[in-house]
Image: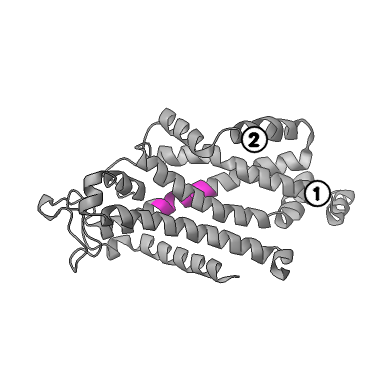
Amino acid sequence: MNRLAIFGLVFIALLVVVAVFAPVLATHDVGATNLAARYLSPSAEHWLGTDATGRDIFSRVVFGARISLRVGIVVVGVSTLIGTVVGALAGYYGGWIDRIVSGYVINVFLAFPGLLLAIAMVAFLGAGLNKLILALCIIGWVGYARVIRGQVLKVREYDFVQAARALGARDWRILFVHILPNAIQPLIVQASLGMAGAVLAEASLSFLGLGVPPPAPSWGVMLEEARDLTTLRVAPHALIVPGVAIALTVLAFNFLGDGLREYLDPRQRRR
């Protein structure tokens, strides 16, 4: 695994620790306002300064990691499960099932930009963390279904699958015991990249006011609250800190996904 992938893995592990122990690591109450302490620069009391209402930025960034990881883990987990089942059935049985799934449903979802579709879904369902997760799950399973369908189409023609079928094995056994374990590797890479996409989608929708509503300590909400010109001039750290947190998290998951792709593909390792 290359150095960038190791950096991604270390950063993600650190992010998980921060999210789990957020109540311990936070130095202030994330919702406590103090107008007398607004726009303070980083100091011993406020490590990353304060925002427009005097809230501690470090504490809000720490709790924001918990929101981002929750969205990423739930969205990727649910999307992977749905996409694996749908894609595996379409790839294994083919015929009218495959025509409906890959020819109509998947193509319809892929015809729209992901973020635009997410905005439409959240606008329909309403703002809120759980509704945001539901919207991202509804549109997120398609990529996993397409990947696993392609893998199943390839693996189902292997000799050991044909041998299992000749011995009278049931379809569910062939699919879940023989095919899926040998088709799951690209899905691991897709899940890592999907975590980056889910974190970025949550931040983008929260920034637009369609995700986690204020005053929740979401990184997207922090960016939205600090985007005015006055804040940029007086306290640029209020905008830079959550932006760097989002950028590093997305890069870490992308680096890890690229490293997993290289590690799981023997041709990439040789190259």
Mark 2 and mark 1 lie on one chain; the one further toward the N terminus is 2
Residue of label 1: 156
Q: Are marks 2 and 1 in contact (CB under 8 Å)?
A: no
Crowd tier of the residue under label 1, counting other residues whose Cα lies within 10 Å: few below 14, some 14–19, many 20 or above: many
Q: Which residue is mark 2?
A: 106
Query: As drawn, is 154 to the left or to the right of 53?
Result: right
Q: Residues within 10 Å of mark 2 (few under 14, many from 20)?
A: some
Q: Quadrant of the N terminus?
A: bottom right
Corner quadrant of residue 44: bottom left
- Asked whether residue 14 is drawn in magenta, I would say no
- Residue 223 on image: x %, y %: 32, 48
Give the left or right position of residue 68, taking residue 197 as reference. Answer: left
Image height of 216 relative to 94, above or below = below
Task: Specify whether 107 is left or right of 228.
Answer: right
Give the dominant element type of the magenta stretch: helix, strand or loop.
helix
Residue positioned 73% across, 66% down in the render: 266
Q: Foreground residue, 264 or 269? A: 269
Q: Secondary structure at mark 2?
A: helix
Please say which color scheme the image uses.
one colour
User: Can residue 74 be found in the magenta stretch?
Assistant: yes
**Disc 2 residue type (three-letter):** Ile
Residue segment shown in magenta: 68-76
Amino acid type assigned to the residue bearing label 1 in the image: Arg
In this rendering, is residue 195 above or below 269? above
Percent position (x, y) of residue 247? 43, 56
